[in-house]
Image: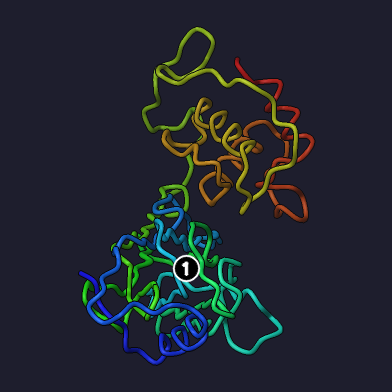
């Protein structure tokens, strides 16, 4: 349903963006086909992780004067927004360059809201698709974190994309949900091979039945908080040696991976006390990496 905008934010869009352009006459209808979406729309996350979420705009052929997001919501108990501009008071997200003027960029981490608006200037129009803004999201707690637009078809005080004359051409939105993975949230202690807990059967090569052999070598230091393809290789190795439960090759070095590394280091008499910074306990350093690489595929 096509709707005309009356909000104060879009009064500015109409005034600046259409001052020198043709306005739709009363009764003229525009195609309501523009979309707003979040990228990524889903992801496995762990507590303490930070990830960039892009607000994507697609005008789908519409010549637009600006975009108004009022509001994008999140649960402040589960996540917070990392400030993108330390020089400006308050908390902001990172504006994109689709429109030249940012008229609103306000994050309220206490209420869990983001308000963001951009407009054109000098009678220009924007038509196309791209990144409207980027949000740096820090995961705090909970089972999942939702980012959702306020959007109701026919409303004039929520998410809007303004075309000529202030006509809203936004037809749909896509929200995002980030679910906590086992890697950051499973409880319990690690039990190395040989414990009283029943273990998987093994093949003649010593690899647990049903587990693939590890292919590749660890070539860099690995530590808690790192997300990298080499972490996936480490986790695959730990799973194959039963230091990490199956299903945790996520590529993110979290609490469970650290416990698995510690168990491996103790079992191999590499190090069994201290911290990652003092003795390398829980980190994959030179000695740990060398021992793991020697055991790869065996």
Return the x and y of residue 167 as percentages of the image width and height: 33, 76
Query: 182 or 41: which is nearer to us?
Result: 41
Return the x and y of residue 78 as percentages of the image width and height: 41, 70
Query: 109 or 61: which is nearer to us?
Result: 61
Return the x and y of residue 109 as percentages of the image width and height: 47, 81
Tell me the quarter of the picture where residue 169 sits: bottom left
Query: 132 or 6: which is nearer to us?
Result: 6
The reply to whether residue 187 is visible in this rendering is no
Where is 180 relative to 213, above or below?
below
Tell me the quarter of the picture where residue 178 sits: bottom left
The reply to whether residue 238 is visible in this rendering is yes
Q: Residue at x 75, y 55 (%)?
A: 277
- The count of marks equals 1
Where is 128 relative to 195, above or below?
below
Query: 155 or 63: which is nearer to us?
Result: 63
Specify few, some or many for label 1: CA neighbours under 10 Å numbering under 14, 14-19, or 20 or more.
some
Tell me the quarter of the picture where residue 59 sits: bottom left
278 lies left or right of 103 = right
Return the x and y of residue 49 as percentages of the image width and height: 54, 59
Q: Name the residue beneath numbered marker 1.
A: 140
265 lies left or right of 145 = right
Outermost residue to the bottom? 8
Q: Residue at x 53, y 81 (%)?
A: 105
Q: Quadrant of the N terminus?
A: bottom left
Q: Quadrant of the C terminus?
A: top right
Q: Residue at x 39, y 73 (%)?
A: 163
């Amino acid at each position: 349903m096509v709707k005309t905008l009356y909000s104060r934010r879009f009064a500015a869009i109409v005034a600046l963006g259409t001052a020198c352009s043709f306005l739709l006459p009363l009764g003229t209808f525009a195609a309501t086909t523009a979309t707003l979406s979040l990228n990524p729309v889903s992801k496995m996350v762990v507590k303490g992780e930070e990830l960039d979420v892009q607000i994507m705009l697609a005008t789908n052929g519409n010549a637009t004067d600006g975009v108004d997001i009022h509001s994008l919501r999140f649960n402040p108990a589960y996540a917070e927004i990392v400030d993108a501009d330390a020089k400006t008071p308050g908390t902001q997200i990172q504006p994109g360059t689709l429109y030249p003027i940012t008229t609103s960029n306000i994050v309220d981490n206490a209420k869990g809201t983001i308000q963001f608006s951009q407009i054109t200037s000098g009678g220009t129009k924007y038509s196309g698709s791209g990144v409207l803004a980027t949000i740096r999201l820090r995961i705090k707690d909970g089972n999942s974190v939702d980012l959702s637009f306020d959007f109701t078809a026919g409303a004039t005080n929520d998410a809007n994309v303004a075309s000529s004359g202030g006509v809203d051409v936004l037809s749909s939105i896509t929200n995002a949900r980030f679910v906590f993975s086992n890697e950051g949230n499973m409880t319990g202690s690690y039990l190395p091979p040989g414990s009283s807990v029943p273990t998987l059967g093994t093949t003649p090569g010593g690899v647990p039945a049903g587990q693939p052999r590890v292919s590749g070598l660890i070539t860099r230091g690995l530590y808690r908080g790192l997300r990298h393809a080499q972490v996936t290789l480490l986790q695959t190795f730990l799973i194959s040696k039963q230091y990490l439960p199956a299903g945790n090759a996520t590529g993110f070095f979290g609490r469970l991976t650290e416990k698995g590394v510690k168990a491996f280091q103790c079992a191999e008499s590499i190090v069994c006390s201290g911290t990652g910074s003092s003795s390398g306990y829980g980190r994959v350093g030179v000695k740990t990496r060398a021992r793991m690489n020697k055991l790869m595929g065996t």
